[in-house]
Amino acid sequence: MNKKRFWFVLFLLPTLYCGSTVRAGEIGLFWKPFGFSDIGLHKEPVLNGFYWLLPWNDIYTYSTQWNAYKEKVDVLTNDDLKIDVQAIIIMRPIREEVYQLHIEVGPEYYRSIVQPEFRASIRNVVSHHQMIQISKNSAVLAKDIKTAVIERTKGKHIEVFDVILDDIEYSSNMLHAIETKLTKQQELEQQKYELEIAEKNIEIAKKRARADAEAQLIRAEAQAKSQVIINDKLTTRYLQYKSFESPNSKLIFVPQGKDNLPIVVNPKE
């Protein structure tokens, strides 16, 4: 009798430590390898909680929360430049299709079906763009990669929430080439600016020269007209009149007087 108890307790002890917990954000599938009924994987999902199990039974758990996976992919751009693109995909299994996912793929579904399609989508999308466009259009590229991944994994029992381009790494040679190019562009812009300033200065100098020439011409024309007027007015009688009128004149010599004889006149008398 004691022997039977011993074997019964020995058989019962392992079952006391056999159990599985389905945590919040997870879904479980009950696995029963043998027995009198319901053998195999059960289609009905196991909800959150702790479950006692016989040693040979098991519960496979799948996270139904959004999980992020990061991939770093080397890509050859459209202009034949090699870059490393680091991207993140946020995804999860479709809750209602966990049974099919387990049967067709298994718990390593990301490594088996998502990872290769995600990496291929990154290469395919980025390779159609030139290197200089990638950083500027990262949001557009991420959207295109997401669309490509969804199309490639259609019917594989997973759903994609988003794709993010996390980082883009360039080789040291490429960075040096970019820096050299930017420096040359800045020098060219500076030369262009200096040329524009020089052209403006030349134009200003030309305008000033034209203005000075026009001013001199106007002054010359005015002087010429003034001289003509003076010449017309400077008659002998006019000069005599002005001489008489001047307070500084003491004696005035008139070259031609009465009977064509010269005379001397004192204006004060």
Image (tube, rainbow, N blue to C red):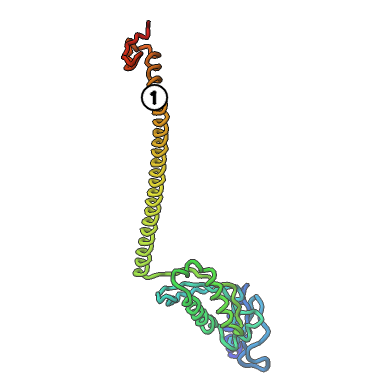
Which quarter of the picture shows residue 222?
top left
* Near-viewer residue (121 or 2): 121
Q: In which quarter of the image is the N terminus?
A: bottom right
- Going 57% across and 72% down the picture, which residue do you hit? 162
**Whole-percent x and y of residue 135?**
47, 67
Q: Quadrant of the C terminus?
A: top left
- Going 36% across and 56% down the picture, which residue do you hit? 191
Which quarter of the picture shows residue 78?
bottom left
The amino acid type found where label 1 is placed reads Leu
Kindly give the residue lying farthest to the top in the view shown.
269
* Near-viewer residue (267 or 158): 267
Residue that numbered label 1 is attached to: 234
- Going 60% across and 83% down the picture, which residue do you hit? 154
Which quarter of the picture shows residue 30?
bottom right
* Near-viewer residue (203 or 73): 203
Kindly give the residue lying farthest to the bottom in the view shown.
36
* Near-viewer residue (185 or 68): 185
What is the secondary structure assignment of the residue under circle 1? Answer: loop
